[in-house]
Image (cartoon, grey):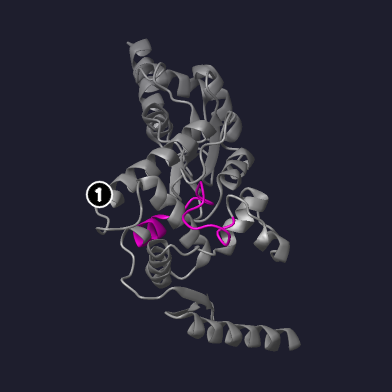
Amino acid sequence: MLPIVLAAAVAGWGYWHLHAPGGAASDTTVIIPKGTGVRGTADLLDKAGVIDSRTLFLVGVRLDAADRHIKAGEYLFPAHVSMDRVIDLLREGKTVVRRFTVAEGLSVKQVVAALKAEPTLSGPIETLPPEGSLLPETYNYSYGDSRAGLLARMQKAMKDKLSDLWQARSPGLPLQSPEDAVILASIVEKETALPDERPRIAGVFVNRLEAGMPLQSDPTIVYGITGGEPLGRPIRLSELQEATPYNTYTFTGLPPTPIDNPGAASLEAVMQPLDTKDLYFVANGGGGHAFSRTYAEHVRNVQKWRSLERAGDEH
């Protein structure tokens, strides 16, 4: 009779200990590498102070039939978490959700460089995707996810967004394909940081395309020089005059590729541009632009901008 009572007492103590609060006094992050196994997982949790008894944890895993279902990854265990809850988290694969943000207007080179520099991602990126094929937004991922996989998600997000916006575009635009829309949106993205200006600047460029005028966008020249990296200096007069595929001062129409990865707002702006008669714009000294319909008016706006520049230099 006594052995039965003792066994029941031990079992009761074990059950209570599995379900009782324990572990570390603060939230603790533990990375379980792929292929670690149950015993290796127990070692990592024990070393991190997440579990109070390695032996009892292994017993709990066996009782829960969780030994074949523990998922690798990065886990955040709450302070004083019980061992049965630890087992549940491992079995359910409730890993830490990380975020990777792609800002609007970054080039493919810049996005790939950021992916390569992120230590919580894994694997190589063998080839650069086409410029303009990545949708800027925030992407959730887990520790150890592949860089190539995250890049593929960005491409799919851009493809889906572009398809939706292209279907809803304004009629009669001088854009022959969704790819043309991305090219123009990438230029709009670089020309203004003000959301309410994007449709108007898109309208200016649409008017120029329809009139057979050069787009005359400085950011396209920069892209032709650097291939998607910052120039770090003013554009030289010789570069403004050089006939290159990205010098939109020397030809009419669009450059051959996008010059960055435009965000959804810039894509929408070129699909639904403001109906305007404007053909010109120049910086106004306040972070935005002054727009004009005629060249004479534009010249006056340029003179105002240069006066502001000179006044700024003097101070």
Q: Quadrant of the C terminus?
A: bottom right
Q: Position of residue 26 (x, y in %)?
A: 53, 47
In this view, which residue lies farthest toward the right? 314
Q: Position of residue 15 (x, y in %)?
A: 37, 26
Give the magenta range: 247-269
4 and 308: which is toward the camera: 308
Image quadrant assignment for residue 49: top right
- Residue 252 magenta: yes
Magenta span dominant secondary structure: loop
Q: Residue at x 46, y 24 (%)?
A: 57
Q: Is residue 208 above or below residue 138?
A: below
Q: Quadrant of the N terminus?
A: top left
Q: Residue at x 44, y 36 (%)?
A: 95
Q: Is residue 294 visible?
A: yes
Q: Report which residue position mark 1 lands on.
A: 167
- Could you tell me the amino acid type at mark 1? Gln
Q: Is residue 247 above or below residue 83?
A: below
Q: Is residue 58 above or below residue 268?
A: above
Q: Is residue 308 above or below residue 236?
A: below
Q: Residues within 10 Å of mark 1 (few under 14, many from 20)?
A: few
152 and 97: which is toward the camera: 152
Q: Residue at x 38, y 63 (%)?
A: 206
Q: Position of residue 97 (x, y in %)?
A: 45, 42
Q: Position of residue 305 (x, y in %)?
A: 59, 83
Q: Secondary structure at mark 1?
A: helix
- Residue 61 magenta: no
Image quadrant assignment for residue 5: top left
